[in-house]
Amino acid sequence: MLPYDGIHDYDTVTSHIKTEERPPRPRNRNANRWLRDEVWDMIVTCWSEDRKKRWEVPAVRELFLALALREVLNANLGN
């Protein structure tokens, strides 16, 4: 699922962004969350009107590296 999926008009998407209408948290076919809480929290924080609250690129990178490492460790442990 892409943000604003189904809206193909640039002006409509721009209007949503300007009025701070954010897309909902994506869900998979089984209605379970497929985005980890850490990732969704980061996304929401990056939408903050206050630029100082937004994540910087190195912090986003570190989050994804940590999540990838966790996945590798879980796969090796059979979880």
Image (cartoon, rainbow, N blue to C red):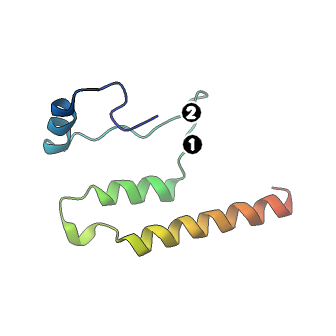
- The reply, left or right, for residue 4 in relation to residue 38 is left
Circles 1 and 2 in contact, beta carbons < 8 Å = yes
According to the picture, the residue beneath numbered tag 1 turns out to be 34
Q: What element carries label 1?
A: loop
User: Which quadrant of the view contains residue 11?
Assistant: top left
Tell me what residue is drawn at x 50 percent, y 54 percent.
37
Tell me what residue is drawn at x 68 percent, y 65 percent.
70
**55 or 9, which is in the foreground?**
9
Q: What residue type is labelled 1?
A: Trp
Q: Which amino acid does label 2 sit on?
A: Asn
User: Which quadrant of the view contains residue 24?
Assistant: top left
Instruction: Report crowding for label 2: few under 14, some 14 to 19, many 20 or more residues within 10 A (C-alpha).
Output: few
- List x then y, in percent, for residue 25: 42, 40
- The reply, left or right, for residue 28 in relation to residue 71 is left
Say whether disc 1 or disc 2 marks the residue closer to the N-terminus. Answer: 2
Residue 15 higher or lower than 67, as above or below = above
According to the picture, the residue beneath numbered tag 2 turns out to be 28
User: Which quadrant of the view contains residue 78?
Assistant: bottom right
